[in-house]
Image (cartoon, rainbow, N blue to C red):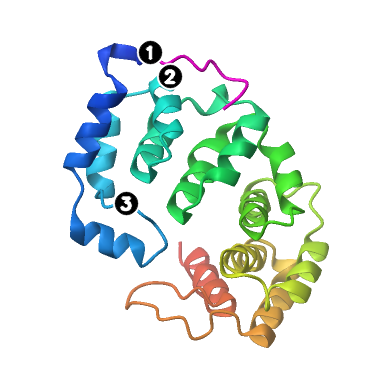
Amino acid sequence: MAGTALTTTALAGTSLSEVMAELAGLEEPRAREVNEKHGDDHGVNLGKLRAVAKRLKTQQELAVELWATGDSAARLLALLICRPKAFARDDLDTMLREARTPKVQDWLVNYVVKKNPHSEELRQAWFLDQDPVVASAGWALTTERVSKQPEGLDLAGLLDTVEAGMKDAPDRLQWAMNACLATIGIWHTEYRDRAISIGERLEVLKDYPTPPGCTSPFAPDWIAEMVRRQQTT
């Protein structure tokens, strides 16, 4: 993480070795089995991980040390106890490219990058990246803007890009593009019919198994359900 204070002294008297030992003690074979089905490589229950983070509170220096171990559970904990605004742009770019697993990537984007002053600069750079995992982070940040700060975005152009590339995109990028498609349809009535039409034609995630009570990720169904909720509240 070049650009941040890379000291190796943990704050509040909590050492890296103590935290790593605690994480090792929380490892559960069943949790690892479940996580590995989703591409993650740790066996720590996330509720227990959050409890550790709550106790440690914010410790940027310890977070840097935890991230440097390369261990996924340690990196998830690092993302919970760090100071998001403390990272330089290049730090975050490097962290995303070395994150490796879906959960670490998702938490990095949602818990850190979105709260960092370089988020918009990174959104624009990642959106065009040739690495589909990096590009998926750019799409996730774009989806955030679609719903909360759409001014300046070319929504029609985003739909063009989705229409042309989502069907054959790698899984993580496809999911991110699909989320952006649905978000445009949910929040922007002038593009809703086109978003639904694109989803129906491409049929991405149409047959994805959805548990009872959950919203389907198939964009037309997702849009319809969220619009229904908006109209009943």
Q: CA distance from mark 1 to mark 3?
A: 25 Å
Picture layout, residue 193 above or below residue 19:
below
**Which quadrant is home to the C terminus?**
bottom left
Picture layout, residue 15 above or below residue 146:
above
Q: CA distance from mark 1 to mark 2?
A: 7 Å
Q: Earlier in the sequence, mark 1 or mark 2?
A: 1
* Residue 3 located within the stretch drawn in magenta: yes
Q: Identify the residue under disc 1.
A: 9
The dominant secondary structure in magenta is loop
The circle on residue 197 is none
Q: Which residues are magenta?
A: 1-9
Dot 3 lies on which element?
loop
Q: Identify the residue under disc 2.
A: 61
Query: Would you say the residues marked 1 and 2 are in contact, meaning their CB atoms lie under 8 Å apart?
Result: yes
Residue 173 location in percent, x, y?
Answer: 62, 64
Q: Earlier in the sequence, mark 1 or mark 3?
A: 1
The circle on residue 42 is 3
In the foreground, 64 or 148: 64
Picture layout, residue 43 above or below residue 115:
below
Categorize mark 1 by other alpha carbons within 10 Å: few (<14), some (14-19), many (20+). few
**Which quadrant is home to the N terminus?**
top right
Residue 70 sits in quarter: top left
For residue 125, side relative to residue 209 (left or right)? right
Residue 76 sits in quarter: top left
For residue 148, side relative to residue 61 (left or right)? right
In the foreground, 214 or 11: 11
